[in-house]
Amino acid sequence: MALWTITAALAASAAQPPAPIVPVPAMQVSPEHAPAVLDALLAARDYMTLGKRIGEVSRQPDLVSDLAWLRDRTIEGNSAFVAMLYSRLLWTAAEGLPEEPQREWRETAAMMTLYAQAAIMVDGQRCGDRSAPANRSQQLLEWNPEIWPFIGSLKAEERKRLVDVAVLVEGKTAARRDALGDVDFLCRGGMEEIQYNLIHGTSREEAPRPGVIGRQIVLAGDGKYKPSERPQAEWTAGAAKMRPTLLAGLRTMTDAVARHSSGAETGKSGPDPRR
């Protein structure tokens, strides 16, 4: 699961990821966590069930199997959502490990978070609603809040290494991601869907969350909204323009997180640079 494992797999072939570190006999894996079952959920783009299934894993054989499945499907070039799940499960699984492997797993989780951000930046070029990808970037920032202070605590050369590998993964998975598209995941939650739900959905008022002022209105759609997609010539041009900026953009982002973390230690952090 460490960074060298991911890098070695990519150097060999993005389509031939390494075997799991600890192979799990199929008979020990719960039926609901069997790779074929997870594959079916991914193929159906049932992200809600997939996320809940993996997020609630409790048995060690299922955890090891899920980690291997997430790694393999990420390196294949599937939805950024898979990389987000992989990052969060790696971080959770690192708890309780000895110091050295725990750090390695956390570094890999951080790298996968950065890769997910790169994929959102590139694949979000498909979205007809240009406000939608920012919704997923915001979700990523809140997905596992412990990852960002960890990134900020790393040395400059360590942050650079994470970014370099994240961009390497993006490049190796680009062709498959371009072919599959990720509109169903990346292009939701923007102004287009909000406007649709205002017309076709229902609304209800909820109690304000702690620290939130004013009425809280929750919109529920009718389940029929389909995200719009830009013409192929437009999104491919946008993706081609975005890719060369990934290294500099992610390095700037991680450096800003480090400055914020350093300032937080002295009480002079200022605004959160992730937002």
Image (spheres, grey):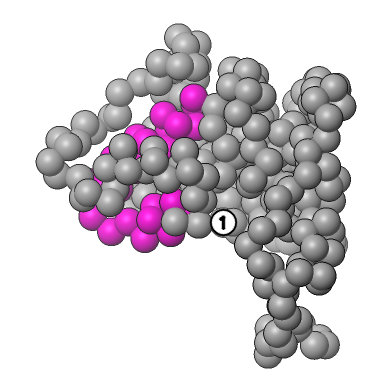
Judging depth in this view, the residue of 172 and 182 nearest the camera is: 182
Judging depth in this view, the residue of 99 and 200 nearest the camera is: 200
Q: Is residue 140 left or right of residue 2?
A: right
Q: Using the rendered image of the protein, determine whether residue 88 is visible from the camera's viewpoint.
A: no
Q: Is residue 52 left or right of residue 160?
A: left
**Percent coordinates x, y for residue 157 in the rendering:** 65, 28
Q: Is residue 62 magenta?
A: yes
Residue depicted at 15% across the width and 35% down the height: 25
**Percent coordinates x, y for residue 213 in the rendering:** 81, 86
Q: Quadrant of the C terminus?
A: bottom right
Residue depicted at 64% across the width and 38% down the height: 182
Q: Using the rendered image of the protein, determine whether residue 143 is visible from the camera's viewpoint.
A: yes
SS majority, magenta: helix
Which amino acid is tagged 1? Answer: Asn
Residue depicted at 58% across the width and 22% down the height: 176
Residue depicted at 76% across the width and 69% down the height: 200
**Percent coordinates x, y for residue 245 in the rendering:** 82, 26
Judging depth in this view, the residue of 27 and 167 nearest the camera is: 27
Check disc 1 and report its element: helix, strand or loop: loop
Q: Quadrant of residue 113?
A: top right
**Percent coordinates x, y for residue 66 in the rendering:** 34, 43
Residue placed under numbered mark 1 in the picture: 144
Against 170, residue 28 (above or below) is: below
Q: Is residue 79 magenta?
A: no
Q: Quadrant of the N terminus?
A: top left
Work out which residue is located at the far left of the displayed protein and give it. Answer: 27
Against 216, residue 102 (above or below) is: above
Q: Quadrant of residue 8?
A: top left
Against 72, residue 14 (above or below) is: above
The magenta segment? 50-76
